Image (cartoon, rainbow, N blue to C red):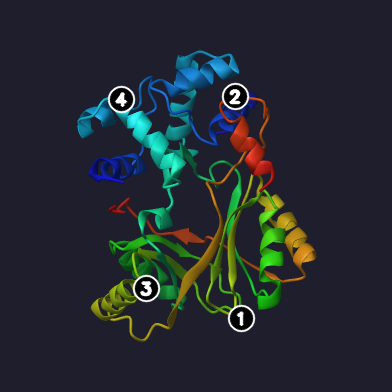
């Protein structure tokens, strides 16, 4: 699916967040000079085409008390990545699981998963259990806990077209400052 | 944050329908009015538990690129380099992590070829090498963060 100019305006208007009102798409439509039906129909198409995964919220794990944010990285033989990646993704505490390229010699790991927990000890204990349960003792892995978090926001894909829009203006301004 | 807030966070992570009144069904499920749902959502945003309510894009389907990058930053320059990196609007988030590679950030660009340009600019600005590790495969995860 190719985005047209109207799609880009629509995405620019909503990427910083929808207004919290009972009829948010009506508010967006008024801002863009469209009808509510045009907005919802096009967003449904973008969602059906997979460009938008869903309309939802971005949760800040730390604010929920999930202070231990561990990136667990594994050095898995290429032929086994599929099998082990699937196993790890099925674990309830794993919130992301990706295969990524190695950067040798400095970085040997090719599978990345995120585990969020309230405390470091509980994350490490859970990891030990996962390793033992799946027999992963021979797979080299390490845990990178996070320290400070500098920036946490959803990705923006469209340069803002109008920063004067009342609904998203403040977020656009914030964005330009990083 | 009470049990209703927790239920709201869990429900909304799964996504809301794109329709004229997207909050109605969730409000009914939770047994609260739409007005109460919206005011609680506003509080969760104000308290920074949630960053926003909006679209979750699929970067690749959008024709864009998303990559995880890491750098080895000398301890005495850490704050300076963090400021330089975060000044790029393409940097979506940035974490300090305990490893030789101690700064980890995500770059999101509208076009794939822009990612390489941004990475070069970051290397020039900071004098640190950027290790770029774009996703090769994603293993499916359901939404399962229980609050």
Residue at the spot of label 3: A120
A64 on left or right of B51:
left
Mark 3–mark 4 Cα distance, whole angstroms, equals 38 Å
Are callouts 3 and 4 both on one chain? no
Residue at the spot of label 4: B34
Q: Which mark is residue B77?
A: none
Could you classify mark 2 by the number of other residues whose Cα lies within 10 Å: few (under 14), some (14-19), or many (20 or more)? few
Residue at disc 1, secondary structure? loop
Residue at 30% from the left image edge and 79% from the top image edge: A128
Q: Along the line of sight, which residue is nearer the eye, A22 or A80?
A: A22
Q: How many marks?
A: 4
Residue at 41% from the left image edge and 34% from the top image edge: B42
Residue at disc 3, secondary structure? helix
Could you classify mark 1 by the number of other residues whose Cα lies within 10 Å: few (under 14), some (14-19), or many (20 or more)? few
Could you classify mark 3 by the number of other residues whose Cα lies within 10 Å: few (under 14), some (14-19), or many (20 or more)? some
Looking at this view, name the residue that lies furthest to the right. B124
Could one spot residue B16 in this view of the protein? no
Q: Chain of mark 1?
A: A
Q: Position of residue A53 (x, y in %)?
A: 43, 41
Residue at the spot of label 1: A106
Q: Earlier in the sequence, mark 3 or mark 2?
A: 3
Q: Chain of mark 4?
A: B
Q: Chain of mark 2?
A: A
Q: Chain of mark 3?
A: A
Residue at the spot of label 2: A166
Q: Position of residue B124 (x, y in %)?
A: 79, 64
Residue at 75% from the left image edge and 66% from the top image edge: B126
Residue at disc 4, secondary structure? helix
Mark 4–mark 1 Cα distance, whole angstroms, equals 52 Å
């Amino acid at each position: 699916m190719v985005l047209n100019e109207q799609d880009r305006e629509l995405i620019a208007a909503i990427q910083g967040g929808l207004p919290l009102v009972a009829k948010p798409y009506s508010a967006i439509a008024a801002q863009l000079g469209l009808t509510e039906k045009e907005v919802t129909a096009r967003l449904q198409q973008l969602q059906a085409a997979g460009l938008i995964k869903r309309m939802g919220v971005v949760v800040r794990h730390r604010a929920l008390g999930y202070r231990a944010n561990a990136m667990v990285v594994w050095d898995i033989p290429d032929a086994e990545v599929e099998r082990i990646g699937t196993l790890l993704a099925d674990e309830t505490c794993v919130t992301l699981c990706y295969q990524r390229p190695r950067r040798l010699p400095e970085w040997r790991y090719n599978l990345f998963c995120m585990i969020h927990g309230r405390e470091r000890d509980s994350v490490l204990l859970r990891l030990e259990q996962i390793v033992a349960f799946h027999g992963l003792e021979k797979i080299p892995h390490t845990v990178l806990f996070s320290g400070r978090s500098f920036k946490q926001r959803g990705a923006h894909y469209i340069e803002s077209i109008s920063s004067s829009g009342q609904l998203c203006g403040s977020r656009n301004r914030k964005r330009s400052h990083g | 944050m009470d049990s209703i807030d927790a239920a709201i966070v869990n429900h909304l992570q799964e996504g809301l329908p794109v329709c004229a009144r997207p909050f109605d069904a969730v409000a009914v499920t939770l047994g609260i009015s739409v007005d109460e749902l919206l005011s609680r959502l506003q509080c969760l945003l104000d308290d920074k538990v949630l960053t926003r309510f909006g679209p979750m894009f699929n970067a690749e389907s959008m024709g864009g690129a998303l990559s995880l990058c890491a750098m080895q930053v000398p301890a005495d320059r850490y704050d300076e380099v963090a400021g330089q990196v975060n000044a790029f609007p393409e940097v979506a988030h940035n974490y300090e992590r305990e490893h030789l590679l101690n700064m980890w950030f995500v770059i999101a660009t509208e076009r794939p070829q822009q990612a390489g340009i941004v990475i070069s600019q970051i290397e020039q600005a900071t004098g640190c090498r950027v290790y770029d590790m774009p996703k090769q495969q994603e293993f499916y995860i359901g939404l399962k963060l229980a609050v």
